[in-house]
Amino acid sequence: MTHTSILSLLGAADLSLAPIDVTAVLDRLVQQADADAATSIGFPGAVDLDHSKVMARLGSRLWNNIGDPADPGGTAHTRVLERAVITWVADILSMPADDRWGYVTTGGTEGNLAALHAAYRRYPTARIYYSTAAHYSISKTAAILGARSVVIDARPDGEMDYAHLAAQVRRRRRWPAIVVATAGTTMTEAVDDTTRIRAVLDEYGAGGHLHVDAALSGIPLALDGRLRLDDAGGIGSIAMSGHKFLGVPTPCGVVLIRDGVRSHSSHVAYTDTVDTTITGSRCGLAAALLWHAIATHGREGHRWRVSEARTLAAYAVNQLTAAGWPAWRHPHAFTVVLATPPEQVRKKWLLATDGDTSHIICMPGVSKGQVDAFVADIAAAAPPRSIPQSRLSPQSPTPPLGTDCLPMPSTDRHGGEFI
Ligand SMILES: Cc1ncc(COP(=O)(O)O)c(C=O)c1O
């Protein structure tokens, strides 16, 4: 929403002024969101799924899944759908049926908190390792838990630097390690290699816990068979967002934790539920929306969505580079990383920007027409200033033929190591 439209809405929405034209305020919000939608390709929310059936039938009452998904009681709740969602996601991740537990969260952030809370209760002296490309919810979670963090370098393409991880784990081998891998980093959609991370932990006998923050890429990579929580992989937990790949129209997510990692929780007498989750009351509507999105498309339907979105992302890279604008993507990614365009293009297309680089995300529902219009705006803009050779990384992903490679800077937003 633009600054001017926020200001005009603020006046109309001021609750100290009566009478308020409620319909006009709500209509204005919808109009603005509709207007933004045509150029909203900077953030990862799928827009191809129709959730209206659930909203129409369930949207006007409270559905509260308070307590554990396995709890039977309470008034209007959707725990039966929540359990089905958890089972489906755990199944596509090949998680052992006898060692899995999870619930529908408020989003990826709560999933990270729930998983790292469980891991830290199990290993209270652990150091929490994550890369500079990890989402800010990880450093925040470590701070909430009062845990010591160790920030690991990320390569310019966003993937963790495993040699740096090994060096840091070796220095602290007397303490257990909780390592957070990211499957789909926020800026470049890089995927950390959990096999290499597990090998580092095994080499230094650091044991501990491996969590995967898969907010964006969890379901796509699971459908590829590339992300597995089977016994061989040694991953203890995973968190995903539900409003990203599944495009659910309310923030939500799924967390899955190996059952053996969880600690015991208390029974709450007045709700007659078990307190296993981070929040108390939990949104049953979100569970129903997730269930509906999965039920109406199934594995094959969602695989098709992944493949269409990747095809569009590859097309976007080709069109940008053909227009002389440096751009690249990881082979599995919906995210296209490009040299930061001039301000008017950034603002119009609501781009996520980090210094020299920006990205667009070709989520399911983004159209070829939108990509073409974006590329036309880019082509009409000033050519990008050249990127210094020192910023080009030998470890950058191999770009498609004829594609310039523009790596991400390695940003250490957390000021390095916290020990
Ligand atoms: C890698 C990663 N983790 C976690 C999150 C947070 O997810 P949510 O907004 O669902 O809390 C994001 C959001 O963009 C993310 O990119």
Image (cartoon, grey):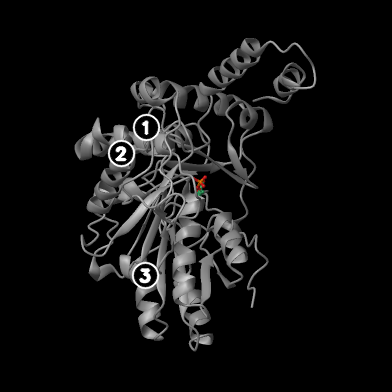
First in residue order: circle 2 vs circle 1: 2
Q: Mark 2 points at which residue?
A: 306
Q: Nearer the viewer, residue 341 or 130?
A: 130
The amino acid at mark 2 is Val
152, above or below 59, in the image: below
Q: Do the residues labelled 2 and 1 touch (CB within 8 Å)?
A: yes
Q: Position of residue 409 (x, y in %)?
A: 59, 56
Q: Mark 3 points at which residue?
A: 261
The amino acid at mark 3 is Val
Dot 3 alpha-carbon crowd within 10 angstroms: few under 14, some 14 to 19, many 20 or more: many
Residue 364's disc is 1
Q: Distance between the residues labelled 2 and 1?
A: 7 Å
Give the quadrant of the C terminus. bottom right
What is the secondary structure assignment of the residue under circle 2? helix
Q: Position of residue 355 (x, y in %)?
A: 65, 47
Residue located at (52% from left, 71% from top): 128
Q: Nearer the viewer, residue 285 or 365?
A: 285
